[in-house]
Image (spheres, rainbow, N blue to C red):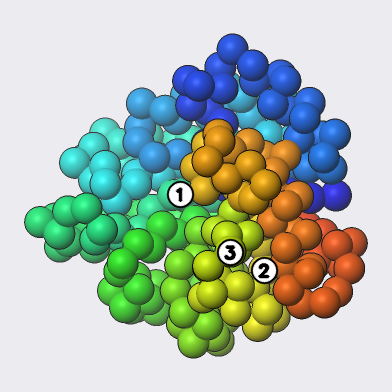
Amino acid sequence: MLIDTHSHIDMDNYKERFEEVLKTAFEYGVKKIVIPGVEPSGFERILSLCEKYENIYGAVGIHPEEVNYFDENSEKLLKEYLKHEKIIAVGEIGLDYYWDKSQTEKQKEIFEKQILIAKEAKKPVLVHDREAHQDTFEILKKTNAAEIGVVMHCFSGSPEFAAECVKEGFYIALGGVTTFKNAKKAKEVAKTVPLDRLLLETDAPYMTPVPYRGKENQPAYVKFVAQEIANLRNISFEEVAKATTENAQRLLKI
């Protein structure tokens, strides 16, 4: 069994063929899927999918590029949704300095606030960290986020940074980039992170792994990520599947 811990299959491009995407995932051995939130208007659809499908779980959070949506109302909404048993995390939240550095202070403020909401709800955080490793790490340490569980989603740092994260008790989630021919850092991370700290994800519809790179991603393709990690570590596919599934079940309680 495999678990895709981060998949945006609530997006409109999956709407007309959602059942087909789920069926393909199950055929590939992907039995559970987590859909993260990015801004408040999407929370209702995520919850409706969670309630309709037994093996779908959700998270709610405001993405760093959407921090202008965070206000008193969205804060209340987050807390309300987190009461639901199938909303299992706060995310995706974090820092993104890639496109726009004009709101770094606001991003940091909202990131910290959402971690505190997660701590109040006793649910883990799914962390988006793009070109903001040091600030992300410092905020996670400052807030003692490891107490509730931290997933470094779509990990893009060095093996050394991965080691620092693991030392703090964080989980490292790897996706399609691991399969890219020239992704040396990602491959080294896949080889060196302890198996009990690894999670699998697709980040669908983005980051599609080889052999479907360049096409739309879907949860089924997390299988190719698992296979690549197994190849890199010179262990069996089954060993990777078992470890990452147990990690996700333990951390996310699914």
Mark 3 sits on what residue? 181
> Which mark is nearer the camera, 1 or 2?
2
Callout 3: few (<14), some (14-19), or many (20+) C-alpha neighbours within 10 Å? few
Q: Amino acid at mark 3?
A: Lys
* Residue 65 to residue 42: above or below: below
- Which mark, residue 80? none
Image x and y of residue 184, in percent: 54, 74
* Secondary element at image label 3: loop
Q: Is residue 178 left or right of residue 40?
A: right
Identified at 63% across, 36% down, the residue is 218
* Secondary element at image label 1: strand
Q: Is residue 17 left or right of residue 74?
A: right
Disc with the residue nearer the chain's start (2 vs 3): 3
* Residue 160 to residue 169: above or below: below
**Residue 180 makes an appearance in the image:** yes
Image x and y of residue 168, in percent: 52, 83
- Which mark, residue 91? 1
Image x and y of residue 100, in percent: 17, 53
* Distance from the alpha carbon under mark 3 to that under mark 1: 29 Å
Instruction: Determine the image quadrant of residue 40.
Output: top left
**Residue 35 makes an appearance in the image:** no
Q: How many marks?
A: 3
> Which mark is nearer the camera, 3 or 1?
3
Identified at 78% across, 59% down, the residue is 227
* Distance from the alpha carbon under mark 2 to that under mark 3: 21 Å
Identified at 60% across, 79% down, the residue is 188
- Identify which residue, 85 or 11, lies in the foreground: 11
